[in-house]
Image (tube, helix red, strand yellow):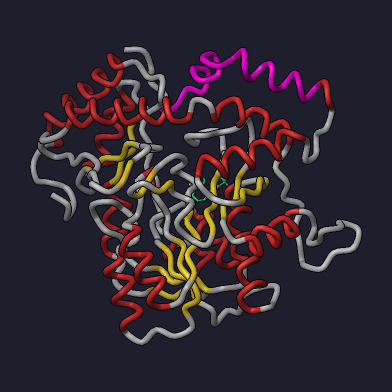
C-alpha cells in the first residue's frame, strides 16, 4: 500500500486548475492586491450562499472570531474590549483559537463540557452552569467541530432566554446546516476559516465574518482596517486584518465546488461508516437528524491507550491519522488563571484521549477508503481488540 497522507491538496488543485490559474492571472493583470474586486465579490457571494445580509473578509479564522467579539463589545458595552468579569461560554474541546479569541477580546472564557456523541458543547451543561446562578455571562461561542453542527435549537433557546449573544465558530463547517439554515447564519455572527486544509480553503490564511446585523458588520469592517472608516483617522483600536485579494480570487473559484465537495465528503464518510460501523473497539461519528454534517474531519473513538497503539500501527502501514485535539483548552498554560471551569469536563478529557481523525478529502478514491478501513480492522483484530471506547459505546 502506498503511503496515505491526511490530506493531499494537489488533488483539488488539479481538479479545478484552469479556473484557479485564470483567477490568479486576473489578479496579476489588475494588480489590486489590497481589497481588490474579488474580495467584494466573495463577500457578496458567500453572504447569498449563507442567507445573511453581510459577509466581511478577514485575514484568518482567528481574526474573524476576535473581530466579531470586539465588535460585540463595542456595540453592547460601548467599550473597546469586554471586561475580565464578562464571561463567554465555550467548549474546551476545540482549536486554541476559539478560547484565545475570547481572551483577546478582553473577556473570560467559561469552559463547559461536551456531548460525548457529537463532541460539541452540551446544552445541558451550559444550562446547568447558568441555572447555578452564574453571573456576568454575556455570550457563548459554540464550535461546530469536525463539520458537525451543535444542537442549535437548544443553544439558541438558552441564548435567547438568558439574553446573551452567540458567535458561531464555523471554522470547520463551511456549507453545513442545522435544519434548513446554513451554519454561520444562526447567531449574532459566524466566524469562518479559509486555512488551506479547511473544506473551503485558500492558498494561505484567510477568514470571514457573517452577520445580518448591520451595526456589527460596520464595526468589523472598521476593525479590520486599523479601526476606522478612514484608516488615516481612526475611532477604535483596530488591526490590519484584511483578506488578501489573491486569496479571495482562489476562494471564489473553489466556492463553485463546495456543495459537490461536501457531498463527496459525506459519501466517503458513509463508506467509512459501512466499513467500520459495528466493529468492536471503535465508534464511528454520530449522526444528528437535524444536521447536515460536512465532515471536515472523520473522527472515530478508540478506547484510551489503545488509540495511540492503533495510530502507531496505522503509521507502520503508511496510513497517517491525526488527533484533533491532543490537549483540552483548560489544561493549556495560556488559560491558567484566566478561565472559569463551569462543570466537570470529563467528557472533553475522555474525548482528548480517544479521538482519532482518519484521512478524508472530497476527491479520495473509494478503494483507498476501503484499504484504510481494512488497515484499521487488521490493526484492531490483534491485541488491540477488547472493551469498548468512551461513554458513547
Ligand atoms: C475550530 C477552529 N476555530 C478557529 C480556527 C482558527 O482559524 P485560522 O487558522 O484560520 O486562524 C480554527 C482553524 O484552525 C479552528 O479549527
Asked whether 18 falls inside the magenta stretch, the response is yes
Q: Nearer the viewer, residue 194 or 9?
A: 194
**As rendered, which of 337 and 147 lies closer to the eye?**
147
Q: Where, by quadrant of the figure, is residue 196 drawn?
A: top right
Q: Up-down: is 162 above or below 20? A: below
Q: Which residues are magenta?
A: 6-28
Where the N terminus falls, by quadrant? top left
Q: Is residue 106 magenta?
A: no
- Residue at the image point whose x is 67% and y is 16% from the top: 21
Q: On the picture, is 203 further left or further right than 240?
A: left
Going 54% across and 79% down the picture, which residue do you hit? 86
Task: Tell me the quarter of the picture where residue 147 sits.
Answer: top left
> Can you say whether 204 is above or below 367 in the image?
below
The percent position of residue 372, horizontal first and vertical second, equals 27, 22
Horizontal and vertical percent position of residue 34: 80, 39
User: Magenta segment, principal secondary structure?
Assistant: helix
Is 291 situated above or below 359?
below
Left or right side of 337 for 67: right
User: What number of labels is visible?
Assistant: 0
20 left or right of 139? right
**Residue 377 on image: x %, y %:** 16, 27
Amino acid at each position: 500500500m502506498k503511503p496515505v497522507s491526511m490530506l493531499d491538496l494537489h488533488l483539488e488543485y488539479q481538479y479545478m486548475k484552469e479556473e484557479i490559474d485564470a483567477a490568479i492571472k486576473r489578479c496579476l493583470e489588475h494588480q489590486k492586491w489590497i481589497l481588490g474586486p474579488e474580495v467584494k465579490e466573495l463577500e457578496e457571494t458567500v453572504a447569498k450562499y449563507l442567507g445573511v445580509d453581510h459577509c466581511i473578509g478577514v485575514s484568518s479564522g482567528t481574526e474573524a472570531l476576535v473581530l466579531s467579539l470586539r465588535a460585540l463589545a463595542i456595540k453592547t458595552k460601548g467599550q473597546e474590549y469586554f471586561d475580565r468579569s464578562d464571561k463567554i461560554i465555550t467548549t474546551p474541546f476545540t482549536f486554541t483559537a476559539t478560547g484565545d479569541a475570547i481572551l483577546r477580546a478582553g473577556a473570560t472564557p467559561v469552559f463547559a463540557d461536551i456531548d460525548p456523541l457529537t463532541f460539541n458543547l452540551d446544552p445541558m451543561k451550559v444550562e446547568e452552569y447558568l441555572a447555578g446562578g452564574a453571573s456576568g455571562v454575556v455570550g457563548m461561542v459554540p464550535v461546530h467541530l469536525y463539520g458537525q453542527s451543535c444542537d442549535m435549537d437548544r443553544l439558541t433557546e438558552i441564548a435567547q432566554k438568558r439574553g446573551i449573544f452567540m458567535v458561531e465558530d464555523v471554522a470547520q463547517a463551511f456549507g453545513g446546516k442545522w435544519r434548513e439554515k446554513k451554519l454561520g447564519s444562526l447567531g449574532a455572527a459566524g466566524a469562518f476559516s479559509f486555512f488551506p486544509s479547511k473544506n473551503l480553503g485558500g492558498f494561505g490564511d484567510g477568514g470571514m465574518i457573517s452577520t445580518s446585523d448591520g451595526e456589527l458588520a460596520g464595526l468589523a469592517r472598521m476593525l479590520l482596517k486599523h479601526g476606522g472608516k478612514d484608516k488615516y483617522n481612526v475611532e477604535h483600536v483596530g488591526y490590519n486584518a484584511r483578506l488578501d485579494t489573491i486569496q479571495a480570487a482562489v476562494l471564489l473559484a473553489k466556492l463553485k465546488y463546495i456543495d459537490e465537495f461536501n457531498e463527496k465528503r459525506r459519501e466517503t464518510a458513509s463508506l467509512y461508516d459501512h466499513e467500520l460501523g459495528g466493529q468492536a473497539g471503535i465508534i464511528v461519528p454520530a449522526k444528528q437528524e437535524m444536521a447536515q454534517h460536512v465532515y471536515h474531519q472523520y473522527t472515530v473513538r478508540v478506547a484510551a491507550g489503545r488509540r495511540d497503539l492503533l495510530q502507531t500501527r496505522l503509521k507502520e502501514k503508511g496510513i497517517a491519522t491525526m488527533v484533533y485535539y491532543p490537549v483540552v483548552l483548560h489544561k493549556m498554560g495560556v488559560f491558567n488563571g484566566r478561565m472559569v471551569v463551569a462543570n466537570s469536563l470529563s467528557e472533553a478529557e475522555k474525548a482528548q484521549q480517544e479521538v482519532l481523525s482518519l484521512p478524508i478529502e472530497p476527491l479520495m478514491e473509494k478503494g483507498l477508503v476501503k484499504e484504510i478501513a481494512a488497515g484499521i480492522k487488521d490493526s484492531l483484530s490483534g491485541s488491540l481488540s477488547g472493551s469498548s471506547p468512551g461513554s458513547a459505546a
